[in-house]
Image (cartoon, helix red, strand yellow):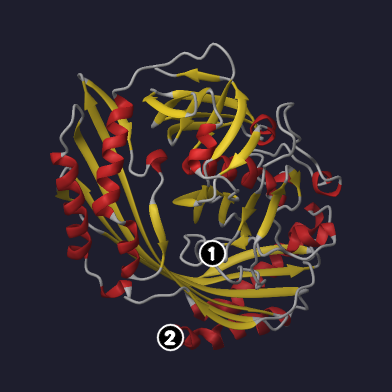
Amino acid sequence: MLNSLTKYEDILISVIKEAQKHNVEFVEARFHSTWNLVAILNNGKSEPSISSETQGIGIRIIYDGVMIFASINSYDSIPQLIEKSISTAKSSKKLSKNPIKFSSEKSINKTWAAEEKENLKNVNIDEMISELNNIDEYVKSFSSDVSFPKRTLILSNSIEEKFYINSEGSRILSRVPRVEFHSYLAAKTNGSLSAISIPAGYAGLGGTGGWETIKTFNFDSYIPEQLKNSSKSITSKLVKFDNDVDVIVGPEIAGIVAHESCGHPFEADRILGREAAQAGESYLDFDSVEKKFNFGTIEEIDKSEAFVSDDPTLSGSMGFYLFDDEGVEAHKRTLLQGGIVTDLLHNRETSFQKDIQSNASSRSVDYDREPIIRMSNTFIEPGDYDFEELVADIKYGIYIKNFMEWNINDTREHQKYVGLEAYLIKNGIKDVNVKSPVLELTAKKFWSSIDGRSKTLKFSSATCGKGEPMQGAPVWTGGPHVRLRNLRVGSHS
């Protein structure tokens, strides 16, 4: 299937050659196509499907220390676009304080693709609606004190193909198909409405692969279990905790914390202030890595259990890729190791500034978007405990399995998570449901309070927002069950 991309090779080469006529320091050209088919079911009625396809070429040029991004989907005007880009670079020179340079990386000649058995383009919208109808019938007929008068179910198929060439000799072709499910439900009980989703926290079930991927979602068992547990949570009672207690958070909360409280503030461009006007800044600085910034531990913990990674090479993951959009080979990045900051997410520009190699964190979501530093699959690493062992060592505390509300400040230091499915823990036993417990704490408090992690990892799909114009990038968030000692837990009616 990737052979169809080679017809664009001459066009990409012409971009490189045209730019080199102007003695540029660097030029790259990326053919980028995206195809999407989305099925939507509202209260059992199918909405018009969303079908879209875009393709074009994104171009970056470094001229006299100034970097310019341009894009085009009409290939007969490439010389004019290059000329305009060079002119823009010249006029921008006086505004540039420091020349932009890229880290030195080896040239790559590779073709890669996510594993795919059933081509998504062979799946029609009726098949997708049928899957959603089966889910809707179960939700509608669910028997409990909770009903679901408003139900929105979404199933999306997408394919992303790229052909990357740069002036250093790299040539990379890629194809990544993805399947993803989302739901948004209004749950009604005793005359009041609550917003929930399956999975909780407005996350999704998603992964890379062909239509066969949908079988891994296990709708027949997953949906009933989630409905049952969420319904119990909605009808449960508030519990007031007068003192600090031990807390276990589930993989959904572990994942959102890893993504928001570790991944984003560890983006090197964010630390430099690039996101300050849009998404905020970071509680870290570049010295954090050089000085091995340590989140430390609270008094009750002998050694830190804070381990966070970002790994784009996870097969089947939403954030899967083998080479980034600057032509650098991807690998697992260790962000936190034993509570110590060990790495940041870098592209070639920030890597040059720190005199290191890029760790392949640069991605773009479409041809008309520049590559920027992005997370892929960010998660807390698994540990050595069974879930039951984590619970058994708590005399009085709470297990917050998932959430429906969260927020975080612009430096990613202060954060709040409101639980959906949660349980009281008494004498090492999981007890009654607890309604809407609240964790409100700092990044340092969270990462320094971990003393145990379960053996099993679980992931959810998500869309990570960043950039101006906005770039919603596919990612996984996740982790094991995580135990934290002596936290203040509030309640939210």
Gap between marks 2 and 1 measured at Cα? 26 Å
- Nearer the N terminus, badge 2 or badge 1? 2
> At 47% from the left edge and 31% from the top edge, which residue is drawn?
399
Residue kind at label 2, given as amino acid type:
Ser
Element under disc 1: loop
Foreground residue among 420 and 22 = 420
Q: Is residue 37 left or right of residue 55?
A: left
> At 68% from the left edge and 39% from the top edge, which residue is drawn?
281
Of marks 2 and 1, the one in the foreground:
1
- The quadrant of the rendering that contains the N terminus is bottom left
Residue 279: x, y in percent? 60, 40
Q: Sort mark 2 into few (<14), some (14-19) or many (20+) by Cα contacts within 10 Å.
A: few
Quarter of the figure with residue 59: bottom right
Determine whether 144 is above or below 36 in the image: above
Residue kind at label 1, given as amino acid type:
Leu
Foreground residue among 262 and 74 = 262
Quarter of the figure with residue 245: top right
Question: Would you name the residue on which mark 1 appears?
Answer: 314
Disc number for residue 4 = 2
Confirm whether residue 412 shows in the render: no
Q: Is residue 198 left or right of residue 68?
A: left
> At 35% from the left edge and 77% from the top edge, which residue is drawn?
117
Residue 310: x, y in percent? 61, 55
Q: Is residue 432 left or right of residue 190?
A: right
